[in-house]
Image: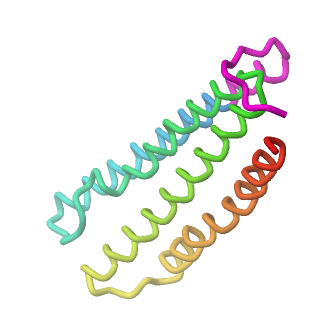
Amino acid sequence: MEKPTTFTITTFWLDWLLLPIMLILGWLTLRWALGDLRKASKLEKEKVESLPAWTISFPLMICAASWVVLGFASLIKEEYWEHRVWCIVLAIWSFCALIGAGLILINFLKRQSSFGTGGLLNLIGLMLLPIIVCIPGMIMCYRIKRLLK
C-alpha cells in the first residue's frame, strides 16, 4: 500500500455515527477540565501555596481538543491518514497524562503533605496510562510502516 497524496471524506455511516460520540466525549472532558479549574481557583483564593489554577486543567483541555480532532479524523477515508492521527492523539494523551502526574507530584511536594490514598492512586493511574495507551499506538505505527513497504 502506497502513501496517499490526498485524503477524502468517507460516506460510511458508522464513521459518521462516531463523530458525535467523540464530540460529546470532548465536551465532557472540557467540563471536567473546567470543574478542575474552578476547584483549583478556590484553593488558590484560600492562599494555599500551589501551582497556578490554569496549570491544573491545561492537560485536560488539550485532551478535550484532541477528542474533537480525533472525531473529525475518523471521517478520513484513507487508513494511512486516519491511523496517523490516531497515533498522534495517543501520543498527546500519553504526554498529557505524564504532565498531569508531574503536576500532582509537584503540588504535593510544594505543600509538603502526604499523598494519601487518592493522590497515590491518581499518580499511579496517570503514570500507567501512557504505558497502556502507547502499546496500541506503537502497534498501529508498526502496522502503518509495514503496509508502506
Q: Which percent across, then down, holds residue 96?
A: 48, 56
Q: Residue placed at 67% from the left, 61% from the top? A: 134
Quarter in which the N terminus is drawn: top right
Residue closer to the observer: 3 or 69: 3
In the figure, is residue 107 to the left or right of 148?
Answer: left
In the figure, is residue 56 to the left or right of 77?
Answer: left
Residue at the farthest front position: 149
In the figure, is residue 93 to the left or right of 58?
Answer: right
Residue at the farthest top position: 11
In the figure, is residue 79 to the left or right of 128?
Answer: right
Q: Residue placed at 56% from the left, 31% from the top? A: 69
Q: Which percent across, then down, holds residue 93?
A: 56, 52
The span shown in magenta is 1-21
Q: Is 90 covered by the magenta stretch?
A: no
Against 78, is 102 above or below? below
Q: Which percent across, then down, holds residue 6?
A: 66, 18
Q: How is the image coloured?
A: rainbow
Against 35, is 15 above or below? above
Q: Residue placed at 63% from the left, 38% from the top? A: 85
